[in-house]
Each structure stands twice: as structure tokens, then as C-alpha cells.
Image (spheres, rainbow, N blue to C red):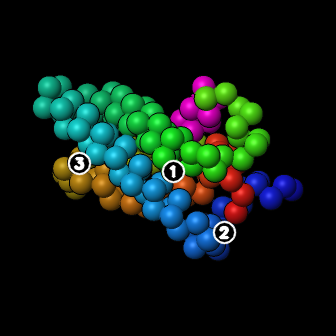
């Protein structure tokens, strides 16, 4: 196995964060900007379409906010620190890879949000916040090794 093969171990994620705290900080800020974009779309969509359309609103918010977070990460978080393997990929391929990495996390976030809404009548904006906090370290690890090919 190569050194960039993702191993989902808590030790690997925490080691990556310790060694790369500046990049981790930037990734978190970029993710938070994407989260705010998601919440803005969700808020607007719920006001215009109501909770009956929440899945449609969530999917639109997830795809567009992931794109915003990708752009911030591409040019600010990773910038010139992208490995030669990732730099050889076209920008479009990295966008697709980032959307793919985040698709599973977004599916979990949306599922938790809808369950909290259905069973606890919890405001969807709060449900998204709770689920997003859990997903951030895993998303950072997977994006680092799969999209930008920065080893741990």
C-alpha cells in the first residue's frame, strides 16, 4: 500500500492534524465557509419551499457548498502544496474527486438532519451543524490523501 492510501484510523487523522495544523486550520475555515453557504441555501430554500422539499434543498445546498469549499481549499488551503500526482490531475478531476469524497459525508449529514427533524422536530439548520462537526476531521483526511495527494 502506498503512503497516501487512506486508512481511516483515528490515530492517522489526529497525526495528520498535528503535523499540519496550519493546513488543518485553513481546511476548517474553508469548510466553515462552505457550511455557511449550505446553511444560507437551506434557510432560503426552507422559507421558499417549506420542509416538504427538504431533500431537494439539501442536495442543491450540498453540491454547491462543496464546490465553494473546494475552491477555497484548492487556492488557499493547499495552493502550491499540492503533490505532483495531484497537480497532474486537471482541476475538473480534482473537483469531481472532492465532490465524491464529500458525497458520503453529505449523505450522512443530510440523513442525520432529516432524522432529527422527523423525530425530534429539531430545526434543520441546527441538525446540519451537529452532523457537520462530526464529519470535518474525516473529510479533511480523505481530501488530503485522495484529492490533493498530500501524504500523512
Image height of 50 relative to 69, above or below: above
Q: Which residue corresponds to mark 1?
A: 77
Q: Nearer the viewer, mark 3 or mark 2?
A: 2
The x and y percentages for residue 30 are 41, 49
Quadrant in the rendering for residue 28 = bottom left
Circle 2: element type:
helix
Task: Compare residues 73 and 40 and report the one nearer the observer.
Answer: 73
- Horizontally, residue 113 falls left or right of residue 121, namely right
Circle 1: element type:
helix
The magenta stretch is 92-100
- Residue under the image location 70 percent in, 63 percent down: 152
Q: Which residue corresponds to mark 3?
A: 125
Q: Nearer the viewer, mark 3 or mark 1?
A: 1
Image height of 28 relative to 46, above or below: below
Q: Is residue 94 visible?
A: yes
State which tag comes first along the sequence, 3 or 1.
1
Amino acid at each position: 500500500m502506498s503512503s497516501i492510501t487512506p486508512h481511516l484510523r483515528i490515530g492517522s487523522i489526529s497525526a495528520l492534524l498535528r503535523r499540519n495544523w496550519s493546513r488543518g486550520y485553513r481546511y476548517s475555515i474553508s469548510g466553515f465557509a462552505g457550511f455557511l453557504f449550505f446553511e444560507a441555501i437551506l434557510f432560503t430554500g426552507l422559507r421558499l419551499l417549506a420542509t416538504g422539499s427538504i431533500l431537494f434543498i439539501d442536495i442543491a445546498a450540498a453540491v454547491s457548498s462543496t464546490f465553494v469549499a473546494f475552491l477555497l481549499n484548492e487556492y488557499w488551503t493547499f495552493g502550491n502544496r499540492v503533490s505532483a500526482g495531484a497537480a497532474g490531475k486537471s482541476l475538473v478531476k480534482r473537483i469531481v474527486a472532492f465532490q465524491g469524497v464529500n458525497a458520503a459525508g453529505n449523505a450522512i449529514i443530510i440523513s442525520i438532519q432529516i432524522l432529527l427533524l422527523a423525530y425530534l422536530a429539531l430545526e434543520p439548520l441546527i441538525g446540519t451543524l451537529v452532523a457537520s462537526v462530526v464529519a470535518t476531521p474525516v473529510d479533511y483526511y480523505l481530501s488530503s490523501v485522495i484529492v490533493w495527494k498530500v501524504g500523512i
